[in-house]
Amino acid sequence: MTIQEQPHPPSGAAPLPEPVPLMGCPYKADPYPLYERMREAGPVHRVLFPSGVRAWLVTGYEAAHAALNDDRLGKNHDRGNDRWRARASIMPEPQHSQLQVHLLHQDPPKHTHMRRFVTDAFTPRRIDALLPRFQGLADTLVDALPRTGPADLVSGFAAHFPFQVLAEVIGLPDELAAGFDRDWGKVVQPVGPTDPGRPLYEARLHGLQSYIAEVVTHKRAHRGDDLLSRLVAARDRGELSQEELDSMIFQLLVAGQEPVTNQITTALIALFGHPGALDRLRHDPGLLPRAVEELLRYDSAFELTTWRFFAEDSDLHGTGVPAGDSVIVSLCAANRDPRRFEKPDELDLGRSPNPHLAFGHGIHFCPGAALARAELRIALGTLIARLPGLRLAVPDEELAWIPAVLGRGTSRLPVAYERRI
């Protein structure tokens, strides 16, 4: 199939480069002006990532929704062609084969088989039963903040609360939870083979792999009625391979907590930029459930999805995509599409309906969505209620946005407040 020309930009607009580079501090701080230009020019664009990977990015809501439900697009890395593999297979062997066969990289029927092992742990009913425990964890972290500001809400709260909640939900015992190094989560940020940071990347990878082995050994010796124990038991019954077990624990530990850490920061930054909305939440906590949905739409921590591939040359909304090229959906661009959301660049805490795609859609819809929503309600509600006068302590331009390719968030969030209640 011949690759078609990209649509022409609207009259008077500067043409988009080919490919469109998705990198640099201005882009990470605020990608939305670029996404607006891309949506106006067409639903599918050739893009370039810092690692050198070239991919096809889907930007509009309707196109994104269709792509997320397109059964022609598979997630298994075996579908990737040599051009993609030359740049995208950042994680070396044997770790790539041992840690990258989790749910995000599987297609039916394997995906269906593996997903059934985790869904029960994240049902809304089970999450609701654990809410008092989650609230206690949040309050303990706030108790440890300075009595008066300033404070860093990443190191003081957001970096710890989601992991503590996750440990509670999946059955990670305190002694093992205490040994988890948050920096291990950075192994999902691409570091190419020639990058000066490659040795540190590989050291983190080995550290995380050893930790996962320790978790498996512990759970095999101390079985319980928890998710980790059930996964280990499934491996011992031959229902999961060792690589699938390790990969699923890898996914739980990394994807299960770092995005929530980042979403807490993006939500707070959005509220700091809209003091009227922050004041409404302070005086009416009952708005929190709907506010969380709007904050997820307004600036999602999951900015882009992971790779998808066509098995054969295919048409994607009028653009020819070769087999094995990577296709990525911009959830953030879809969630700001004016054809789906009225005044999409405005933060409207009362927005309803709000069919955002922050958790994806279709068979790969995030299984931990109910947990993430509960964590955000508790985190935001607790911080707003217990830290009167909560506000950003530095200018917006001083915020350090993480360099992750697929996600959004800040590495620090300096805040001021009057006192700790």
Image (tube, helix red, strand yellow):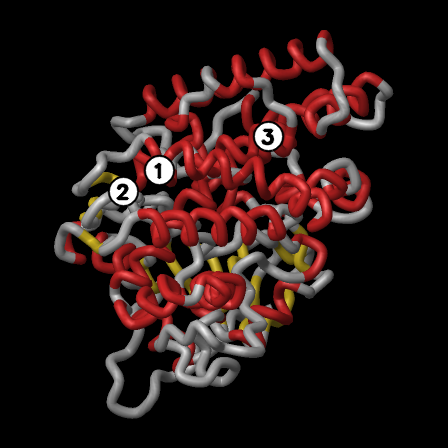
Residue 263 appearing in the image = no
Nearest the viewer among 313 and 225 is 225
**Position of residue 81 measured from the top left corner of the image (x, y, whole percent):** 57, 47
Nearest the viewer among 355 and 235 is 355
Name the residue beneath numbered marker 1: 142
Helix, strand or loop at disc 1?
A: helix
**Position of residue 108 measured from the top left corner of the image (x, y, whole percent):** 78, 48
Amino acid under label 1? Val
Q: Nearer the viewer, mark 1 or mark 3?
A: 1
Q: Nearer the viewer, mark 2 or mark 3?
A: 2
Screen quadrant of the N terminus: bottom right
N-terminal of the pair, mark 1 or mark 3, is: 1
Vertical comparison of 93 with 131: above or below: above
Q: Dot 3, crowdedness within 10 Å: few (<14), some or many (≥20)?
A: some
Name the residue beneath numbered marker 3: 168
Q: Left or right of 258: which side holds 64? A: right
N-terminal of the pair, mark 2 or mark 3, is: 3
Among all residues in the image, which is located at the extreme right?
237
How far is disc 2 from disc 3 in space, using C-alphas? 26 Å
Among all residues in the image, which is located at the extreme front?
421
Vertical comparison of 118 with 97: above or below: below
Among all residues in the image, which is located at the extreme bottom?
11
Amino acid under label 3? Glu
Q: Nearer the viewer, mark 1 or mark 2?
A: 2
